[in-house]
Image: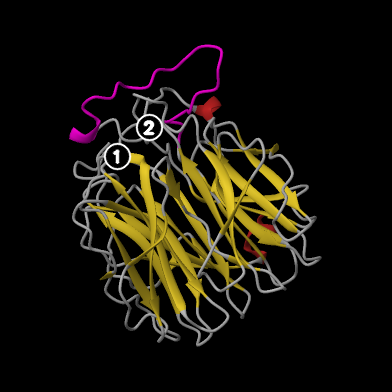
Amino acid sequence: MTQIKPDCSGRLSINKNDSARIEAFLPTECVQNHAANLLPLPNGDLLCTWFGGTQEGIADISAYYSRLKKGSQTWTKAVKLSNDATRSEQNPLFFLAPDNVLWLLYTAQIAGNQDTAIVRYRQSHDFGETWGPIKTLLEDPNKGIFIRQPITVMPNGDWLLPVFYCIAKPGEKWVGSYDTSGVMISKDNGKTWLNVDVPNSLGCVHMNILLLKDNSLYALFRSRWADNIYACRSTDGGYHWSTPIATNLPNNNSSIQATVLNNGHIALVFNQSSAKDAIARRISLYDEIEDESCANKKEAEIIDGQKNAFWGAPRAPMSLAISMDNGETWPYIRHLDEGDGYCMTNNSKDSLNREFSYPTIKQSSDGKLHIAYTYFRMAIKYVVIDENWVKNFN
């Protein structure tokens, strides 16, 4: 089933099957586009960053961004924001600090080796019109440090950046089976960082921290086991966390994102699927990449009797859920896109991948929900709806 690349002109249009949805495919000249993150700005503009290139894990992957200016009907031409020809630069995100300095953060890894990842950043003092130099924020010679979700600013001024650690078994290629999560806390506006490990978080990654109306913290996780979304809480500002436990929502070892709405409800975008829906599995996310740096490392094995990272569960449908009780229950769920979610390959050159994945969601001051996600690993699809869109379906 060959897919035709969508019109990536960036023009907004009304969905022909649902007039309550406005959509666009963001402008891009890259073969592969993945891992979007949105950020509404105080002036009404909307930013979106993602990574693009030939294929995830290859060194031509870089961070890009586009802007939807207030009142405009078209996203601007994509701008390249990273340029290391020796590393794959992935999972970019924007953070607007309280002093209105705009941060771009992203990971940079050697080929398909997530256990070599470091976190880099750039800053802008004019909301992304111009950018300062690229610098390193976080690195560890013993493991890869990865990010995916935005920074949370606490009432006391602390910054909480969720990270996950990509760890490979000695002599083996990284596959994700030994990854854990942590929270980096800064009390000095990002100059220094304290690491807080999330207890018993093996296999729980992409930690998404939400500041609830009572100032407690609720966090959701992607599962390397492709079983369920996991969750934990903190009541002391992120310095101590409960052990992540499985929710009743499925997860397919793919990214999720949630946001606290203006009314206190939580909106979550995710794939409503898991390993139970898979018809096959892959050993690794990067099993198609030729990598000389791993020439002396053996392929990781699926070992009976222990938990192993599960790759290949369908990345579809793309769903939106609403919780009205701080994540205890999710009574409202509606699909944004449906398909078979085929992701047994990351190949975008031959249009083989059919996933909807790596969603991002933000609410603007007018109450609209802005969502973006990967479309067949060819493009970033943008959707804007009213928060009642999902509830009205039920």
Q: Is residue 34 magenta?
A: no
Magenta stretch: give its range: 289-314
Q: Secondary structure at mark 1?
A: loop
Residue 36 percent coordinates (x, y): 42, 59
Q: Which residue is mark 1?
A: 112
The residue at the point 42 percent across, 40 percent down is 142
Q: Is residue 200 above or below residue 337?
A: above
Tell me the quarter of the picture where residue 7 sits: bottom left
Where does the image place residue 191, in percent across and percent down from the top left? Answer: 50, 70
Q: Is residue 92 left or right of residue 210?
A: left
Q: Residues within 10 Å of mark 2 (few under 14, many from 20)?
A: many
Question: Is residue 60 left or right of 11 when viewed as pictured?
Answer: left
Q: Would residue 331 be found to the left or right of residue 190 on screen?
A: right
Q: In the displayed structure, would residue 198 be above or below residue 49?
A: above
Amino acid on which the number 2 mark rests in the picture: Trp
Q: Which residue is more in the foreground, 370 or 24? A: 370
**Which amino acid type is shown beneath numbered disc 1?**
Gly
Neighbourhood count class around disc 1 (C-alpha, 10 Å): few under 14, some 14–19, many 20 upward: many
The reply to whether dot 1 and dot 2 touch (C-beta < 8 Å) is: yes
Q: Position of residue 50 (x, y in %)?
A: 36, 60
Q: Nearer the viewer, residue 58 or 180?
A: 180
Give the number of the disc on residue 174. Answer: 2
Q: Main secondary structure of the magenta part?
A: loop
